Amino acid sequence: MLFIFSSPPFYTEYVHLPSIHDPVPPPILHNPKFWPFFKDALAAIDGSHIHCAPPALERAFYRNRKGFISQNCLFACSFDLQFVYAFTGWEGSATNAWVYDDARSKDLHIPNGKFYLADAGFPMSQQLLIPYRGTRYHLKEWGCAGARYDMLYFWYCLFI
């Protein structure tokens, strides 16, 4: 299935990289939390491990950090949840940064002034927006969730 989805004619007909002339996606344009901060974001990009069955001699290279045999594939998804890029075939032991570097050298073209959203497994560059290392995000949301739980627990104990 992976070969079918990453090869012509399916890939060339249904998967298209966003261009500099594409309009800003409505989820960004109409949300004050995202506009104007993400107006130049094209899509989100991440690696995914897909189970595979390589020849016995190559199996050690395909064993990923979690211990199973896989391919590390790079996928980009637009904000309307459509695949805009797929790069497959790397061994499971390869990091997202290696796969991204190879994709950039082949056919992943990111226009100047635009960027992709990525996680901390990717290299820092002008074309990727990654989280700051050592920064904890969403602490306020998790703190409020704990306070709600404590209040519910208090009311539960009060009525038992």
Image (cartoon, helix red, strand yellow):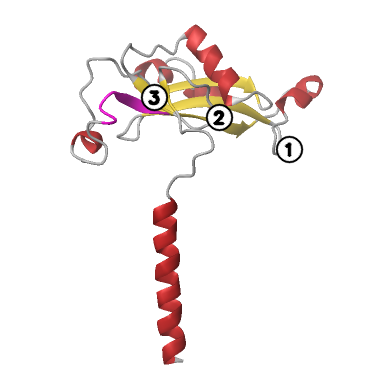
What segment is highlighted magenta in the picture?
37-44
Query: In the displayed structure, would residue 134 be above or below residue 10?
Result: below
Q: Secondary structure at mark 2?
A: loop
> Which residue is the site of mark 3?
116
Q: Which residue is mark 1?
A: 67
Question: Does 143 sit above or below residue 153?
Answer: above
Q: Residue at x 39, y 69 (%)?
A: 148
Q: Left of 29 or right of it: where is 92?
A: right
For mark 2, what is the residue? 121
The first of marks 3 and 1 along the sequence is 1
Name the kind of residue labelled 2 in the image. Answer: Gly
Type of amino acid at the residue the image marks with label 3: Tyr
Q: Residue furthest front?
A: 134
Neighbours of disc 1 within 10 Å: few (<14), some (14-19), many (20+): few
Using a 10 Å C-alpha cutoff, classify the residue at mark 2 as few (fewer than 14 neighbours), some (14 to 19) or many (20 or more): some
Quadrant, the N terminus: top right
Viewer-nearest of labels 1 and 2? 2
For residue 153: magenta?
no
Q: Is residue 96 left or right of residue 30?
A: right
